[in-house]
Structures are given as C-alpha cells and as structure tokens.
Image: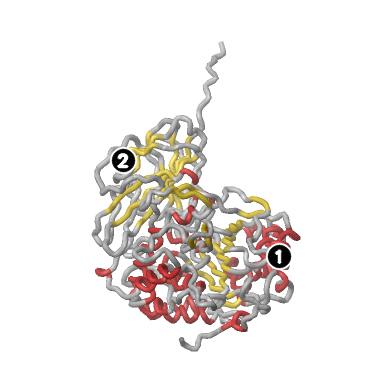
Amino acid sequence: MQDRLRENTAVHVAGAGADRRFGTRRHGTGRPCRRYREPRSLSTWTESSQGTSTMKTTWILTTGLIAAQLASVFAGASVLPAGATGPVRSRLIILADMGNEPDEEQQMAHMLVNCNEFDLEGLIAVTGKYLRPEAKQPYRRRLHPELFHRLIDAYAKVLPNLKLHAPNWPEADYLHSIVRAGQTGYGIAATGPGKSSPGSKLILEALAKNDPRPIWIVVNAGANTLAQALIDYRASHTPAEVEAIVAKLRVFENGAQDNSGAWICAQFPNIHWIRSNYQTYAYGGPGGRDGNTRVNLGPHFWKPYPYSPEGQHAWLKEHVRTGHGALGELYPERRFGNGRLGFMEGGGTVPWLGLVNKGLFDINHPSWGGWSGRFTANKVANVWSRHRDIKPDEEKVAPFYVYREVSDVWTNPDTGEVLHGDYVPVWRWRPAMYANEICRFDWCVQPFNKANHHPVAAFNGDPGDTIVRLTAKPGEKVALDASASTDPDGDKLVFHWWQYEEAGTYPGRVFIDGANTPKATAHIPTGAGGKQIHLILEVRDQNPIASLHDYRRVVVDVEPDIIDSGATQE
C-alpha cells in the first residue's frame, strides 16, 4: 500500500468530476453489465426459437432524467407518463464500518469489480453498533478509512485488465479522492453544531452538485454521518430548501446499526428511506439456525462445495481469492475471533447490488424489486431495529416511517422447492449474482477471449438499459420481441419472459405465449383494468465459465375499464 493512509482527514481533490471518471457506455459491447435471476415458476429453459407477435403497442423507454420526453410511439394505445423509471446510471455513496469485521472488505472488493456500472461519489468510514469508541477491542475504537485506500491500490493494479472487458471504470486516483472519515463517535449523540466531519461535508458536496439525479446512499453501519450532513444543511437553509435536498436522497439502511436512522426519519419525514433487517443479509446468508437443525444459508448455489460457510469460502477461494489478481488477494475470509467462519459478505452487498441492473431495478420504486431486494410501495410506521439496545432510543423519537421488507414466492429451479418469505426477494436472483461475481473477478486477470461477458437484452430492437413502459387495454395482446438481443462472445442465448406478480398491482396470473422464445405475447386479462403488470425479460448466455444474464423490465399500465352507461338521452 502506498502512502495514502489518509485516515480521518482525507483530502478532497478538486475537479474530480464525471469526465475524469468515465468513458463510453456499457460493458464489453458498450452496455452496462447485468445479472441473472431464477424463473419465478418451474418452467423449463429452452433455446431461442421464433414466436409470434400480435399487435403494435405504444411503448416508452425512459431514463428517469428525461422520462416524459423520451417516447417511441407505435400505433394503437395511449402513452402514460413514464417518470417512474430510474436513471441510466445511479449516483452512489457508501457508509461502512470498515475494520469492524472482514465482511466489509469482502463487500468493497466485490463492489470495486462492479463500479463501472454506477457513479461512485463517496466512500465514508463510519461508526456503528460494533465499531465505536466504547468497543472492547482497541482496533474497533477508531475509524479505518485506510482500508478503502488499501483496496483501491489493489484495484489500480487490475484496472488495466478490467478495461479490456468493459468501459466506464473510474480511475484509482479519483476513488482515493472520495474516501472520507465520518463521525468518530457513536449514534446521534455524536452529531450537532460544530461536529461536522469530512464525511458529512462530502455528502453535502455531492448534494450541492448541479446534477438532477438522486443519490443512492448505502448505510452499512451507523447513519450519524448522514444525520450530521442534514443537521448542517438545515441550520443554514430555508425549510423549502431542506425539503428539496431531502428529495434527492434514496437511502438504503442495512440493519439499523445505530439510533440515527429513526431520528433522521422522524426529523425529515419525507425522506426516501429503506430499512432492511433481513434481505440485506441474503447474498450469502442469513446464517443462524433454521429450526435448530442446520445453518440457514438460503438456496445452495455454490456447488460442488458443501452447504456451509466453509463451503462458501471454498467457492470464494476458487473464484475470487486465488488466481484473480491483487484485488482478489485482498478479499479476506470472514473469520471471527473464535476462528469460526461466517457466511460470505455479511449484509453490505445487497444494498448496492441492484444498481448494476439498470433495465431491472429502479431506485425510485422499492416495491418493484431487483438485486437489492423488494420493499413496500408506501412507507410504514416504526420498523424497529433488530438490535435490542437500539430500539429503546428509536421508541423515543417515534413515530418514524420507512419502506420495509416484503416477501416473495419463488420456485428453486434446481430443486423444485417452493420458497417464500422476506429473504426470497434476494434469494431468487442468487444464481445470477454468483455468476456475475465469478466472471467479474475473471476480468481482473483474463484476456477478453478467455472470459465471459454479459449478453445484451434488446426489447423491440432497442438494446438500451432502460425500463420499458407500455400501456394496453384489458383483453389485449401485447407483443414482446427480444430477437435483436446479442452476446459479445457469440454464445447461444436462452430467453425467458415471466411475470413478476408481487411487483405489480394486478392480483392474478398473466399468460405469456412463447415465454421461452425471443418473441412472445402477453395476454392482458380482461379484469386487469386500472392495474399495473410487471413482465421481466431474461436473456441468458450459454457459456462454460458461468451463465450471465441481462434483463429488461416491461411495466404494463392497463387502462381503466370503460363503463358504458347503457342509456342515451332523446
């Protein structure tokens, strides 16, 4: 590691802007990488064949920045406003208790091999329940931003090879420039007038940029550095200005690890705040015991290794930790002081992972789901921290409102087992997520022709990253065409169209004719008037390294039923 251990006073580098960070669009073919999820039903994957289409439909591809303006209209239906879809690239700031345990370094190494897919604007070392001045272990009594720098130095060594496989990688110097230390004390008590930190100032700098996109803030520990930023802003701005700045925030809080999150939500009730007590652990866990009979690690997709944390780490040794360059070498085992191994990556991967799939995940709609889980469409009151010593402080500031986790039902295609519950909205994507991790760490060392790259899912001839918006009438047939999809490696493609029932508002099944072909037809039920239906296009490549996926979400807003009065006046 170089002499970049800036610790609590990382220096801001002026002019580190977007033009310095990024080149052209997309992974190996010029398109942002994405991932895979298992089909919702136990339908069989088939190779591409020709299907039939039945009608022209008005459809919209939007970026969220210019949602209402971007429209491609065919004959037939009317266009609904499409402002719901998310931006092509999301802005991201991560708050993490680096040094608390090895999972933070696992998560951040993993994040760095995906960081060409979003605009990373801050890496802030913060305190939390376990890393704080009162901790028993001396190492956990202080912040460790130097761990970010250590990982970035390793990233710099593999960056030239990463650039062989995809564009848009930020330069290492830029990443060093956005490392900060947050509040040095624990909880909301460590905030207030005169307590600004380099981390809280960075958040304010990001919010002050002339950039209309919202900022996805991942809170992988305590939230008091974000609280300090809001306290400072409120002290010098009007209530209307405060509301405007709060409206730019999209917060994902992992595990409610201090008392600041509830305080922020009570003080700034319009803030967009997701609280995950369960799904955040579902990348490799949740761990613990299931019926006191076995460790509950969710669906077993790290075969041929055993169903255990040891098995997961054997999988990581093969695919990440050995033979994958300097960054993989710094990917640690998640081993605790008693020698026990924990499930891989803990709880801090899921919060940022959804940003990779721009055609699937929308940061403005937590109920739509994706690799970062699925949550309520509206905020609910008093979703308490699972930590017993934090809940009493939250009760003092209640009521507060957050988006909470919801459950999915999914059939594991490997076993036929039907799974349901709060972990399933992440588990259902697990095979694709793991394949993505395998292939991206390969990019650190392999030439282009010895690695796999994501296919490009095209909808109606458009290979973009946007979520598709359609309108249709009850009883109509909607043509779905992915025949222009491609693969940069020339791999065969497998197609699957499926209805994400839980993400929509129509409470029934939608029949898709040709669901396993490039061209399919969705039959809109006659009783679906006024409802919203979510269809997912999955395009998977057939590659011996690992099967990578790309997605397009198709949101169908069904027009209301027309009520015929049945009477005419003379």
Query: What is the spatial separation of the Cα atoms under label 2 and label 1, in whole angstroms?
Result: 55 Å
- Disc 2: which residue: 514
All told, the count of numbered labels is 2
| Residue 332, picture quadrant | bottom left
- Disc 1: which residue: 234
Residue 279 versus residue 512: which sits nearer the camera? Answer: 279
Q: Is residue 90 visible?
A: no
Instruction: Kindly identify which numbered label has been placed on residue 161.
Output: none
Q: Identify which residue is drawn at 48% across, 40% down.
A: 557
The x, y position of residue 524, in whole percent, is 42, 35
Q: Which amino acid does label 1 sit on?
A: Arg
Residue 563 versus residue 132: which sits nearer the camera? Answer: 132
Q: In this view, does 90 lie above or below 416?
A: below
Other-residue count near label 1 (Cα within 10 Å), few / some / many at <14 / 14–19 / ≥20? some
Q: Is residue 300 visible?
A: yes
Q: Is residue 9 above or below residue 385?
A: below
Q: Identify which residue is drawn at 49% across, 45% down.
A: 502
Q: Image check: 230 left or right of 347?
A: right
The x, y position of residue 231, in whole percent, is 70, 67
Instruction: Name the image quarter holding the C terminus.
Output: top right
| Residue 161, picture quadrant | bottom left
Provide the secondary structure element on which disc 2 rests. loop
Q: In this view, does 560 lie above or below 150?
A: above
The x, y position of residue 441, in whole percent, is 36, 71
Provide the secondary structure element on which disc 1 rests. helix
Q: What residue type is labelled 2?
A: Gly
Q: Identify which residue is drawn at 44% across, 48% down.
A: 418
Q: Is residue 261 above or below residue 360?
A: below
Q: Image check: 558 left or right of 458?
A: right
Other-residue count near label 2 (Cα within 10 Å), few / some / many at <14 / 14–19 / ≥20? many
